[in-house]
Amino acid sequence: MPQHINDNFDATIVPLEGSNLIEASAGTGKTYSIALLTLRLIIEKNIPIEKILMVTFTKAAVAELEIRIRAFVRMALKVGREQQIKDDTITSMVQNQILHLGKEEVCKRLENAQLFLDETSVLTLSLIH
């Protein structure tokens, strides 16, 4: 069942199990939410970035999502290294996981993700009529 961004969808607390389909209008925060979910999978579930598959419908969305994920991984790693960033959501997510897993483990997961950013799988689907 699709998660609708405008139906109180919260990428910071949605269960990280099975598949997540995010469906919403332009400008509602889909890319931000998908990038947060990706970051959570890396930090909370220790899923390597190269094992996460994201699918969207346009090449422009793929490019935007790849840029956002790269930025989020780098920002999260800065938080893990006790540097300030401007995104309170990412800061909170990383700090909460540091409390649960320890700084060393969280930083290791993020460093591995950063090493494999070029292996990120963001693909497009073409609909044939």
Image (cartoon, rainbow, N blue to C red):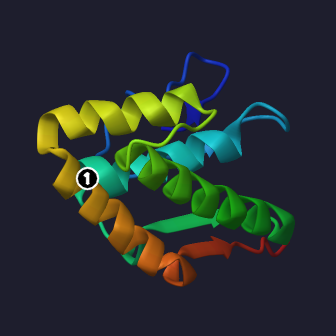
User: At 55% across and 64% down in the image, what residue appears?
Assistant: 54
Disc 1 is placed on an element classified as helix
Q: Position of residue 114 (x, y in %)?
A: 46, 71
Q: Nearer the viewer, residue 46 or 77?
A: 77
Q: Position of residue 31 (x, y in %)?
A: 68, 47
Q: Is residue 40 visible?
A: yes
Taking the image as shown, residue 33 lies to the left or right of residue 98, namely right
Which of the 4 quarters of the picture holds residue 86? top right
Q: Position of residue 49 (x, y in %)?
A: 41, 70
In this rendering, the answer to whether 8 lies above or below 89 is above
User: At 51% across and 29% down in the image, what residue appears?
Assistant: 89
Locate the C terminus by quadrant: bottom right
Q: Residue furthest top?
A: 8
Q: Position of residue 113 (x, y in %)?
A: 40, 69
In this rendering, the answer to whether 47 lies above or below 45 is below
Q: Residue furthest left?
A: 101
Q: Nearer the viewer, residue 82 or 113?
A: 82
The amino acid sitting under disc 1 is Val
Which of the 4 quarters of the picture holds residue 70? bottom right
User: At 48% across and 38% down in the image, what residue appears?
Assistant: 1
User: At 36% across and 61% down in the image, what residue appears?
Assistant: 110
Task: Quickly name the residue at label 1.
Answer: 106
Taking the image as shown, residue 39 lies to the left or right of residue 120, namely left
Q: Is residue 11 visible?
A: no
In this rendering, the answer to whether 112 lies above or below 72 is below
Which of the 4 quarters of the picture holds residue 13? top left
The image shows a total of numbered marks equal to: 1
Taking the image as shown, residue 33 lies to the left or right of residue 29, namely left
